[in-house]
Image: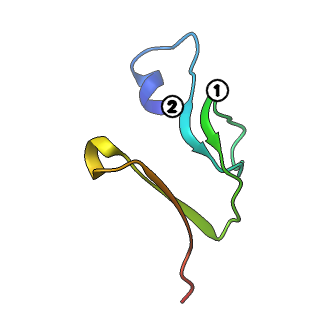
Amino acid sequence: MDALIDMGRPKAIELAVLIDRGHKELPIRADFVGKNVPTAHKEIIDVTLKESDEEDEVIISEIAED
């Protein structure tokens, strides 16, 4: 947001996300959501896209603990 404001004061800022995990740490929410995917805090989501990764895929995996 700082980078946007550095370019001038916008009338509005809209946020679009492919995946919304539902974890809110800031008072910000996406205006446009591709898919809601509830996850635990110990899970991560990896997204691959056909244009750069040869296939469209969403993988949910658990963070490895030491």
**Left or right of 54, for residue 23:** right
The three-letter amino acid code for the residue at tag 1 is Asp
Rendered image: mark on residue 65: none
The three-letter amino acid code for the residue at tag 2 is Met
Name the residue: 72% across, 48% down.
24
| Relative to 27, residue 62 above or below | below
Asked whether 50 or 19 is in front, the reply is 50
Which marked residue is nearer to the observer: mark 1 or mark 2?
1
Name the residue: 50% across, 14% down.
9
Rendered image: mark on residue 31: 1
Q: Residues within 10 Å of mark 1 (few under 14, many from 20)?
A: few
Image coords of residue 19 (percent x, y): 58, 44
Circle 2: element type:
loop
State the quadrant of the C terminus: bottom right
Name the residue: 42% across, 24% down.
6
Circle 1: element type:
loop
Image coords of residue 59 (percent x, y): 51, 61
Image coords of residue 32 (percent x, y): 61, 27
Rendered image: mark on residue 1: 2
Q: Residues within 10 Å of mark 2 (few under 14, many from 20)?
A: few
Name the residue: 70% across, 50% down.
25
